[in-house]
Amino acid sequence: MKKVNILIVDGRVELMAPLVEVFQRKGYNVTVVENGDEVIRLLKKENFDVLLTPPRIPGVGGIWDFRVFKRLCPSMAVLVVNSGSEKKEMAEVLESEIEAIVDKPFNVKKLMDTVESILEVPLILIVDYRVEDREALRNMLAERRYRVLVAKNEGEAIEMVRERDFDVMLLDVGMAGTDGMEVLETVKKIRPDTEVVMMIDYSSLRLVGDLLKKGAYTCLYKPFLDIDKLVKVIQEVQSQRRTYTSLTNSQFPHN
């Protein structure tokens, strides 16, 4: 089962206990904080999958806007809580890039359905030492509403793979000073289920056979990466995972 981290922000932490219990029964890791300064502290040292937050959050230094948190953790899905008392702030939220608005008091079933639909969106890691390339690719995938993180080198990528269960890794075969094939082998040892798409240039065509033997899902060409073809690959991976989950659940149903 994937490790799922959920962060809840609410000024009355104790009132979140019933909701925390619902999430924990699903196997999710849940952290509850009461102000924006605590959110910043947490996001600087770990990643979260979902943030449940009011439109604006008090902190020691003033008011934190949830968009600040989104910049710290771009792959984090933001669910903004509408309590009905923040009409001006909610009008601004409607113009922001968020995943959903949820009403308070919570309809627990509806909230859980919303969270589960978000978690079905593939989590993607881009590993490329070229800043322009990885940022351009991240932006293209983010526009299509995928959850995306980036790593600039081998060490950073391996550390992130140890911490999180990515659905797809996009790995540049020509990492600066690093053999991309070695990174591929290490990733498959740590997370055998992570599908690794190798990004290669035409001078690396001779490596395709070896990369596939080492466990690469497929190889796509740079620098003119076909984004439509990449999306198709991601959709294939997502479909395969859903099929596997469905089969597993039918063979080993929960009590």
Image (tube, rainbow, N blue to C red):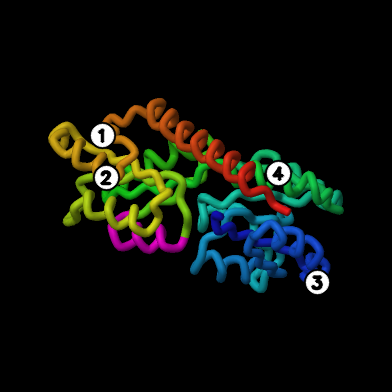
Q: Nearer the viewer, residue 141 or 95?
A: 141
- Classify mark 3: helix, strand or loop: helix
Q: Which mark is residue 172?
A: 2
Q: Residue 63 placed where, x, y %?
A: 68, 63
- Asked if residue 12 shows in the view, the reply is yes
Front position among marks 4 and 3:
4
Q: Which label's residue is closer to the chain start, 4 or 3? A: 3
Q: Which label's residue is closer to the chain start, 4 or 1? A: 4
Q: Which mark is residue 39?
A: none
143 w.r.t. 39: above or below? above
| Distance of label 3 from label 2 (alpha carbons) | 46 Å
Residue at image position (34%, 39%) is: 217
| Distance of label 2 from label 4 (alpha carbons) | 34 Å
Q: Which label's residue is closer to the chain start, 2 or 4? A: 4
Question: Disc 3 designates what residue?
Answer: 14
Question: Disc 4 designates what residue?
Answer: 114
Give neighbour class at mark 4: few <14, some 14-19, many 20+ (Cα, 10 Å). Answer: some
Q: Residue 13 placed where, x, y %?
A: 77, 70
As shown in the figure, which amino acid type bears the numbered disc 1? Lys
| Distance of label 4 from label 3 (alpha carbons) | 23 Å
Q: Quadrant of the N terminus?
A: bottom right
Give neighbour class at mark 1: few <14, some 14-19, many 20+ (Cα, 10 Å). Answer: some
228 w.r.t. 75: above or below? above
Residue contact between numbered discs 2 and 4, judged by CB atoms under 8 Å: no
- Classify mark 2: helix, strand or loop: strand
Q: Which label's residue is closer to the chain start, 1 or 3? A: 3
Q: Which residues are magenta?
A: 152-163
| Distance of label 1 from label 2 (alpha carbons) | 9 Å
